[in-house]
Amino acid sequence: YVLCDGCVEIEDASQTKAMATFAAGSVLGLVTHFFTGKSLSTVRVGAKGAKAWKMTRNTMTLLCEQHPILQDALHERAQELMQCAGNGDSTSAGAQSSLPI
């Protein structure tokens, strides 16, 4: 999802505390359990509401085909995030990103 207006909080489904907050301009994805399809988190809309655009895989593929610079930037950022995850670095730029992994 691309958050167009407002803000949202992501809460752990097993707890009721916010894990992350996203503002307009952020990109976020939701994580589900592989076998059950059950959501692992809950999205709570901020007090002033929020508007989001659901970006499907097909939409992202089309955007990347039409804008190769976008595809290159996403690929580069994904590589950085994977390196951070491989190093167990939770304080790096990867932890600050609003890109879904």
Image (cartoon, grey):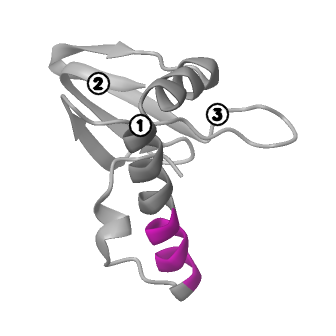
Query: Which segment is the magenta one?
Result: 79-86
Q: Residue at x 25, y 39 (%)?
A: 22
Mark 2 vs mark 1, CA separation in Å:
8 Å
The kind of secondary structure the magenta stretch mainly shows is helix
Q: Residue at x 33, y 16 (%)?
A: 52
Residue 3, numbered circle: 2
> Which of these two is toward me, 24 or 55?
55
Residue 58 coordinates in the image, percent (x, y): 63, 19
Residue 56 coordinates in the image, percent (x, y): 57, 20
Instruction: Point out the tag, 2 or 1, that comes first from the N-terminus.
Output: 2
Q: Quadrant of residue 47?
A: top left
Q: Secondary structure at mark 2?
A: strand
User: Which residue is tagged 3?
Assistant: 39
Query: Does 38 lie within the magenta span?
Result: no
For the residue carrying disc 2, how many other residues have a C-alpha within 10 Å: few (<14), some (14-19), or many (20+)? some
Residue 66 coordinates in the image, percent (x, y): 47, 24
User: Which residue is tagged 1?
Assistant: 28
